[in-house]
Image: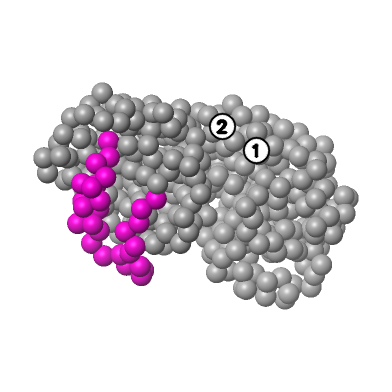
Amino acid sequence: MSSRSRILHVLYRMGTGGTELALKKLAAELDPKRFENIICTIAPQATTEDVSDIRYVTLDRTGSKTGFLLPQLLQLFRRERPDVVHSRNWGAIEAVPAAKLAGVRRVIHSEHGRDIHTMNGDPLRRRLFRRMCYSMANEIVAVSPELSRHYAAQLGIRADRFKVIPNGVNTTKFCPNDEARLRFRQHLGISGQTVVLGTLARLDPVKDHQTLLRASAQAIQAGAPLHVVIAGDGPEKRRLIELTASVPVLQGHVSFVAETRQPEDCLNGFDIFALTSLSEGMSNTLLEAMATALPCIVTRVGSNADLVQEGETGFLASAGNAEKLAQHIATLAADAQLRHDLGLRGRSRVESQFNLRKMVESYSRLYAMDASSQPMARAVLDRI
């Protein structure tokens, strides 16, 4: 029998979002002598991830509605015999009752954010099912205090039912790099004197890039020496390009950059990072921008206000408030010393509170809590 604990992670799909990124980092960093990682996606897995000691499986469900998942998940858990099942977000929550039926001794569910369609509240049927699944799980995890308060209020449960484990950043990978900064700006033909306001996110309505463009236009109109870089891909790209073309003051001041596998180089090319989302969980990219010593301008949604301290590491504005965002952009664009000071304080905050090592240690303790009962868990599964 293997001495390692087998962790079966379940989520809807492996894409480029924050939940997927956090899982990839965690699975890659967990001690391979103690933990075996299997990642199960509900939707088809487009490509095979080239990560040693991490195995991928998929339920291959397609379409906007996946249907009843419990029988297929139950079959998977009986076959794989995990010591721990860890499901993430609504799209994988059926793994909780399936794991219990399969006799898995330790079942964990975590919440990493909110869907744009239900960011102000879930419908009753979903709330009832979520509450039932929460009651069955051994542990419920949220990535931020704000998210735990949100779901506690939605479901009428105590916030301390949640363990809060923040996302973590590799502060060695994400750090100031003058060479990367020069390469990025030379590639786009941006001079050293130009202030680059950048964002790095999926081009999705929830990220509200349109408000960022409107705020940037106001700042440029007021005289800010600004160039805007929007990095990422997604369904909003065509609309954002059309909006940029329709605003004369933005002409020559906006660059669209495709999604990159080296976000650390992209972030180093920025002077200011902006995240104007309508809804967020805990943004990995925001943490990475702070680790890169960038001053940040963010909307007051999700855990953004838990990360960015007003006037200390950046500035906040209400979602959709282009005028306030423009004021913050102009303030930072005009003051290089302020950008420098806010950026350094932001990096220090990430190093002390949101580093990758702390995140991995927290999940390692969570997974190891059942290590002593591992043989019993396997025996139960063998009898089913």
Residues 295 and 324: in front is 295
Amino acid carrying mark 1 in the image: Lys
Span highlighted in magenta in the image: 56-83
Whole-percent x, y for residue 235 in the image: 55, 69
Query: Which element carries disc 1, helix, strand or loop?
Result: loop
Amino acid carrying mark 2 in the image: Asn
* Residue in view at x 53 percent, y 29 percent: 357
Mark yes or no: residue 52 visible. Answer: yes
Query: Which element carries disc 2, helix, strand or loop?
Result: loop
Q: Would you name the residue on which mark 1 appears?
A: 173
* Residue in view at x 60 percent, y 63 percent: 233
240 horizontally vs 361: left or right = right
Q: Which mark is nearer the camera, 1 or 2?
A: 1
250 horizontally vs 99: left or right = right
> Is residue 80 magenta-colored?
yes
Q: Which residue appears farthest toward the front when viewing the image?
A: 1
Sequence order check, earlier mark of 1 and 2: 1
Residues 274 and 24: in front is 24
174 horizontally vs 150: left or right = right
Q: Would you name the residue on which mark 2 appears?
A: 355
Mark 1–mark 2 distance (CA, rounded to whole Å): 11 Å
Q: In the rendered image of this protein, does residue 212 appear above or below residue 282?
A: below
